[in-house]
Image: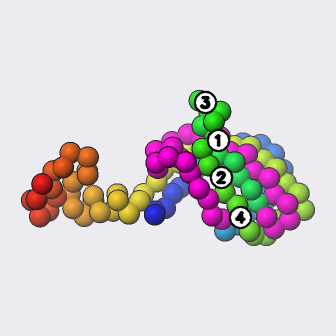
Amino acid sequence: MGVFVSVGAGGGVNVSGDVFIGVITGDIGNVSGTTGNINVGLGPISITVITDPNTGKVIGGTVGLGPSATPVGSSGTVSVTGTFTLRDLWNLIDGGDGADGEGGMDGRK
């Protein structure tokens, strides 16, 4: 569980805002960095397919609900995403990176 920020450029006709839920295959690294995104909006419902731009493989998707300025919309983007997870928060507090077994503030291994 965590949060993300995504910035990208693209094209299409799609003016909407929504609350969404999604899934990513594999670990968080699959969505961290550059992704290709195809979004289709039908009224208040939006569906996004997230792809790896290097392989073209689908790595996830979202389904959202929210207001739209147009009854039908579609867009494609290339985005760069940064993430911050609960594990990142714990590692920040603990002082370790979780990868090498070194302890953080408590000195345990």
Q: CA distance from mark 3 to mark 2?
A: 16 Å
What number is the disc on residue 64?
4
List the single residue furthest toward the front: 26
Q: Dot 1 lies on which element? A: strand
Magenta-tinted stretch? 20-45
Q: CA distance from mark 4 to mark 2?
A: 10 Å
Q: Is residue 98 left or right of residue 67?
A: left
**Residue at horizontal 64%, vertical 41%?**
58
| Tag 1 residue | 58
| Tag 3 residue | 55
Q: Is residue 92 magenta?
A: no
Of marks 3 and 2, which one's residue comes earlier in the chain?
3
| Tag 2 residue | 61
**Residue 80, image quadrant:** top right
The type of residue carrying mark 1 is Val
Of marks 4 and 1, which one's residue comes earlier in the chain?
1
**Residue at horizontal 69%, vertical 48%?**
49
Indicate the position of residue 23 as horizontal and vertical percent values: 59, 56
Can residue 79 be spotted in the picture? Answer: no
The type of residue carrying mark 4 is Gly
The type of residue carrying mark 3 is Thr
Q: Is residue 43 left or right of residue 17?
A: right
Q: Is residue 38 magenta?
A: yes
Mark 1 touches mark 2? (CB < 8 Å): yes
**Residue at horizontal 65%, vertical 46%?**
50
Indicate the position of residue 8 as horizontal and vertical percent values: 63, 45
Indicate the position of residue 33 as horizontal and vertical percent values: 51, 42
